[in-house]
Amino acid sequence: MSSTLKPLQFKPLNGVRIVVWSAFAVILLLLPLAAQSSFALTLLCLTGIAAIACMSYNMLLGQAGMLSFGHAVYTGLGTFVAIHAMNKILGGWPLPMWLIPLVGGFAGLAFGALLGFVTTRKAGTPFSMITLGVGELVFAAALMFPEFFGGEAGINSNRTGGTGWLHGMGLTFGPQIQVYYLIAIYLFVCTAAMYAFTMTPLGRIANAVRDNAERAEFIGYDTRWVRYLIVMASSFFAGIAGGLTALNVEAATSDLLHGVRSGGYLLFTFLGGVGFFFGPLIGSVLLIFSLVVLSEFTKAWQLYVGIVFLIMVVYAPGGFSALLMLNLRRVKYGEWRKMRWPYAGMLFFGLIALWGFAAVVEMAYQFQVAAGSGSGLTVAKIPLDSAQPVSWMIAVAVLIAGGIGFEIWRRKFAKVWSDGEERIAEAVKKAEAAIV
Amino acid sequence: MSVLNGVSYGLLLFMLSAGLTLIFSMMGVLNFAHASFYMLGAYFAFQVSEWTNYWVAFLVAPMLVALMGGLFERYILRKTHKFGHVAELLVTFGLSFVILELVQLIWGRTAVDYKVPAALDGSLFKLFNSSFPEYRAFMMVVAIGMLASLFLMLKKTRIGLVIQAALTHPETTEALGHNVPRVFALVFAGGCALAGLAGVIGGNAFITEPGMAQAVGAIIFVVVVVGGMGSLGGALIASVLIGLLQTFAVGLDWSFGGGLQSLGINVTSETFGYPVWKLKLSQVAPILPYLLLVVMLVVRPKGIMGTRDE
């Protein structure tokens, strides 16, 4: 009996895993070399911090199925406590600066223990509503205590001070590159820790609670306790992200706690994909890209993000990581070649429709919000004039033409896709039959 | 006076939370964009009353909002139904984003000049030197009238019967030949119409601006949780309670420190926790609904009239 039913063995070090994790480390190590400007380096720092925050959010949403609208509370409070700790270091505390993110982490953990006790009393939809309420509570309360939160202006600190073990050797965090490497190290360690967490019994039972809370309760687990522990673990990592923010920007204002920020974590974690561990990494890149780069190009960036989000929820609820994995599966079964032309057609007409849509939106914006700066504008280098009806007609015509072309190719694509799905299902069935 | 103001604000909250509760108890969908439909109602009313007059807007704006809600349910929300409640919540969350941006795109980022109609722009009576505006009374009448007709429709008409049946036994209702998805779309549209109506009468009583959805959104969630998920009666009690709580607190400048001082305990800026003691009740007013939520969850997690405890 014992020879036929061997217990499943967990092998932490297999070939693929070593390759993936070392590649991750090497990428983190080499990215600053690709970043030629200080702006690019700033982007990398922000992305690294957002990656930790989004992954910690995914511990709630992806792992335990808890949709939280108040995650910025933990990152934000982590930042505030970290800033105060930095000021204490400047005042003479014998703590090295590079431990500040851990201070933020423990602050996050403490607030997770306090607030999570209330929020986890309910699961599912009520949980979401309560996190929203608690998030508003903390944000409003922050303005009431200017002694700690600094009121409207916020509080500042300085990361170059203090002594600490490595300070004498030149690790002063004066140059941004030192901050980047600190963020990279924290990102790597946190990613590894969160991945390991998914393998623990608690991480596994969180999946069970997500999939069927009733059954988990029947086999003897207290689902509320599981939710509580997950919230605490998640807010610990969120607090680390908050602490890194404190080091990175050396200031904290109360809008760090605002519901808009929580909504951003939710939105981009979902866009990245909650079903796979690496999904939030994609999400954090998109988050910083939209927040910093896209918002430079257009004032209406939130509209585009919102519409992309709506389309993703309806048509691809697994996010970008699931799209990637589905296409990799096609490649594996040799089906991808058949979809090249539908993809190309959809991309071509999609871009045309996008141009038409962007032209309409940008002209409306020019007309409504930025009317003071004239009526002329360019969309993708093509000049338009929001005061001329011709411009509007062109934009709408392009939008309609692109939309029709896109729909035609989308139908072709849907057919090729579902045919391929059938063939893959057959191939899988055959392979299974061969094993038995 | 504060009582009347509180009750009228509470009734407005109830108009919002009634639609939310109705949609939630029927479809299990938490409509995150509910407050956005409230905002749409106010903006539509503003636009229509610019073109015609207030009374046309009063009738047309809620219908427009209901139409948009129905279309959203039919063509977007229904598609996510198979992915479960989280996806449904997310899709309404995304919608609230898009509506906010579209409103800013069409009407701009600053508040619009949506005024109370001249016929109702007077004071109804005076009490202790402060006047009670006619429009507040009008708000209360509309809210109570809506509440009564909602109650009658659910309890006394055939449509109400079908809705109630579809609420508890959707399969059986479907087997009896009723189109349950259409009933769902109808309820969603109806809930949105209530939010739109609240926007029509609330938009000019307060202020019509892009931030109005967010200002009221979290409060109505608190109302629904405190009242008990899916309970209309509970929502009524909770919204009046919160309306009164907020209006009263704004007018009072009591603080814990003052209270302790009158008990003979000296509180100065040296005392431990002074920032907490010195806070005035009027300063705390914005967070009172959320504090109520927290207290309620600790004391009675299922809410005032909640029946089911998960």
Image (spheres, rainbow, N blue to C red):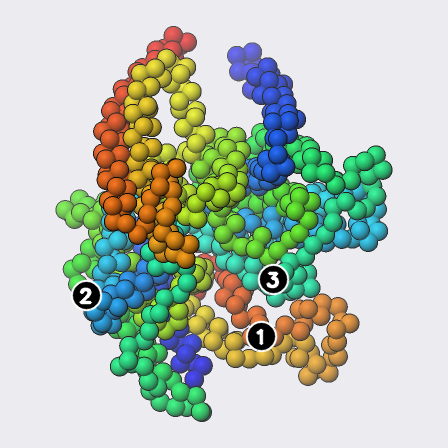
Residue under the image location 25 percent in, 49 percent down: A389
Label 3 crowd (10 A; few <14 / some 14-19 / many >=20): few
The residue tagged with tag 1: helix, strand or loop?
Answer: helix
Q: Amino acid at mark 1?
A: Leu
> Decide: marks 1, 2 in contact (CB < 8 A)?
no
Co-location on one chain, circles 3 and 1: no
Of the two numbered discs 1 and 2 in the rendering, the one whose residue sits closer to the viewer: 1
Label 2 crowd (10 A; few <14 / some 14-19 / many >=20): few
Looking at this view, is A167 or B156 the one in front?
A: A167
Of the two numbered discs 2 and 3 in the rendering, the one whose residue sits closer to the viewer: 3
**Residue of label 1:** B281
> On the rendered structure, is B190 left or right of A164?
left
The residue tagged with tag 3: helix, strand or loop?
Answer: loop
The chain carrying label 1 is B
**Residue of label 3:** A152
Residue A428, located in which quarter of the rendered image? top left
Residue under the image location 56 percent in, 49 percent down: A72
**Residue of label 2:** B156
Distance, label 3 to label 1, CA atoms, is 20 Å
The residue tagged with tag 2: helix, strand or loop?
Answer: helix
Looking at this view, is A337 or A40 the one in front?
A: A40
Q: Is residue A236 visible?
A: no
Residue B238, located in which quarter of the rendered image? bottom left
> Decide: marks 3, 1 in contact (CB < 8 A)?
no
> On the rendered structure, is A147 left or right of B230?
right
Q: Amino acid at mark 2?
A: Lys
